[in-house]
Image (cartoon, coloured by chain):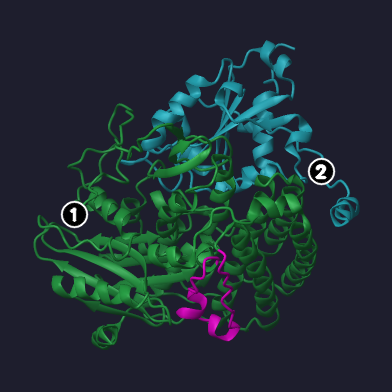
Chain colours: A cyan, B green
Amino acid sequence: MLKTLRQIASIGIVSEPPPQADETLRVRDTLQESIREVLGRALCIRHVDAGSCNGCELEIHALNNPLYNLEGLGIRFVASPRHADLLLVTGPVSKHMEVALLRTFEATPDPKLVVALGDCGCTGGIFGESYASRGRVSNVIPVDVEVPGCPPSPTRILQGILAALVRAPGQGQ
Amino acid sequence: MALQSLFNRSDVQHGAPGLRGVTVSPEQWRQAAFDLSAAGARLLALWASGANQASHLISAVFVAPEGGGLVLTLPMVNTDEPYTGIAELFPAAARMQRAIADLSGVRSTDPDTRPWLRHAAWPQGYRPLLDPPSQPIANPVADSYSFVRVEGEGVHEIAVGPVHAGTIEPGHFRFSVVGEKVLRLEERLGYVHKGIEQRFTQLPLMEGHRLAARVSGDSAVAFSWAYCQALEGIAQFDVPPRAAWLRALYLELERIANHLGDLGALGNDAGFAFGLAQFSRLKELLLRTSQETLGARYLMDAIVPGGTRSDLTRTGIAALSGCLGEISNEVLTLRAVYDEHEGVRDRFNGAGVVSTELAARLGLIGLAGRASGQAFDLRIDLPCAPYPDLAPAKIVRTEGDVAARVAVRFDEFQQSCRLVQRILSELPDGPHNNPVRIPTDGAVGIGLIEGWRGPVCLALEAGPDGTIRRCHPQDPSWNNWPVLEHAIIGNIVPDFPLINKSFNLSYSGHDL
């Protein structure tokens, strides 16, 4: 116990300030103004691996480390799509995950946001489209923000998630 | 003795050093599998290849317990006739054979003929590795799968997945339970099958390493090295010493990063969030130093045919060495915390036991195998440069529980830190990359690399004009997924996440 406390005390708080939203990542803007006000930054995310190589998952995990401290921003990952405001989808959508992704999307209450992650989620990546792959996420469900990278860094992922939340220029107050 | 005569008849196999290859008749195939099993050898890969129906080959890679590796190749006379299945001798072969039937349309004599990688994405008659590429079927449909039903009073089923309650890859687990105790677990995988093997045949030979790195992103270095080892083997190319040492540096850094991630997650799954916070912080420090010195947090494209993409500067060496020193000191402190924490010990000890006997019979390999007394490590059994110089030790435990798999990770972490420091201080001079000439049509090479999870195997056949005719990557998860079904028996359902994490198997690397 003493060792544990000593370690906690000696490391201190290492969390860093979050990056700014990168609005250039937004590909679609349909979110009602009212919901942005309701959500603020208290956002619940459901991650769906729709065919990823698991590289993007490693960087999603990193968002929860003390340096990025996602929960400190009021954003957290939830266990059910029914509790989620935003789906974070990785991978080219494999044919075998298409039904599961559609059902997850349907189970998420409206209004909802979708962020496609990684080169594969944005374009199909190196896997492309084939007998087993539907390619990019937007081939299967509507996508609001696309964050490219292989894998994208935690900072880029955070910029993308925040971009889904901020107002588009010219849209109400 | 029988095994010796097989080795005597064999020829040098291109690719991994020390690997031998032999072509066998159907009778010899059966006998060879029997002899290899009796000698305690491990099956690392099994696949079918062939440009058309008339010329099919079944190939299998084995590694013998006291070192030495053998590739058996069985030419098929008639592909309508099934080949002799070897699942009774090598249980891991069962799913590999089902996958071969799904992708190449060739069947074994073994009884389980349920599809494995094929769900509803393509019809039974379509053979992705033989027939021309096709577009996906228009309508998404979910199919049904005949799980084995457990019957009896009070038995009920819990179905989990494919979408899991966390940041995990997709797969389906069907538990049959009484109360909270698991009687049986049956896995169903294949959800992230994205046609990797067919995709390989559409890429140039000199670019296949990029796809290999994305077979399982957490093992990018191991797979891209295995690909380059196979390619350089058939091109008869000598890797420059500096490149070989840099590759080993990347491989050990990959091992360190994954072990740090797992050690934190295992603490968390045992209800000790402190562990996750501490280890994930250390992992982040390593990834940032990696970005700064090697140009990437994850080394997806660092290994290329001919060597490595970039070199390491003197300042880079100093920065990496300093970072590793700091991290390894902190891990010593954290290990003492884990060891002394009663709650953690209580969850780790005796959970998910795979006995040494069971591990040997089912063919458990890699990190999980070494925690159950299975002393296989390609860095020692079939070492490629620079491992004969680095001379790592096999880290073996016999308890076979979650605690043993944690202890192996701690020990391997410390050993890898020492290896990295040695590589950094003795890195040979010279080029980090030389041009590779395109190998001849039809040459086959096999790469074998001990990744952090276990032995990664990749078979590569060159086509005409720098194309890929066939490429088959095999992740150790193929061997270890079936063993997880046994590890959970008799444990309680809430311990499954912890036990599953202690194996940390790849879905993508398995589903291809």
Q: Amino acid at mark 1?
A: Arg
Q: Position of residue A13 (x, y in %)?
A: 86, 46
Q: Position of residue A107 (x, y in %)?
A: 51, 20
Tell me which residue sits at (70%, 42%) in the image: A64
Q: Position of residue B375 (x, y in %)?
A: 50, 74
Residue segment shown in magenta: B371-399
Q: Nearer the viewer, residue B503 or A139?
A: B503
CA distance for labels 2 and 1: 56 Å
Q: Single out the mark in the foreground, 2 or 1.
A: 1
Tell me which residue sits at (63%, 13%) in the image: A32
| Left or right placement of residue B202 versus residue B479 in this view | left
The overriding secondary structure of the stretch rendered in magenta is loop
Residue B80 higher or lower than B65, as above or below: above
Q: Nearer the viewer, residue B271 or B254?
A: B271
Residue B399 higher or lower than B278, as above or below: below
Q: Position of residue B384 (x, y in %)?
A: 48, 79
Badge number at residue B145: none
* Residue ID for mark 1: B107
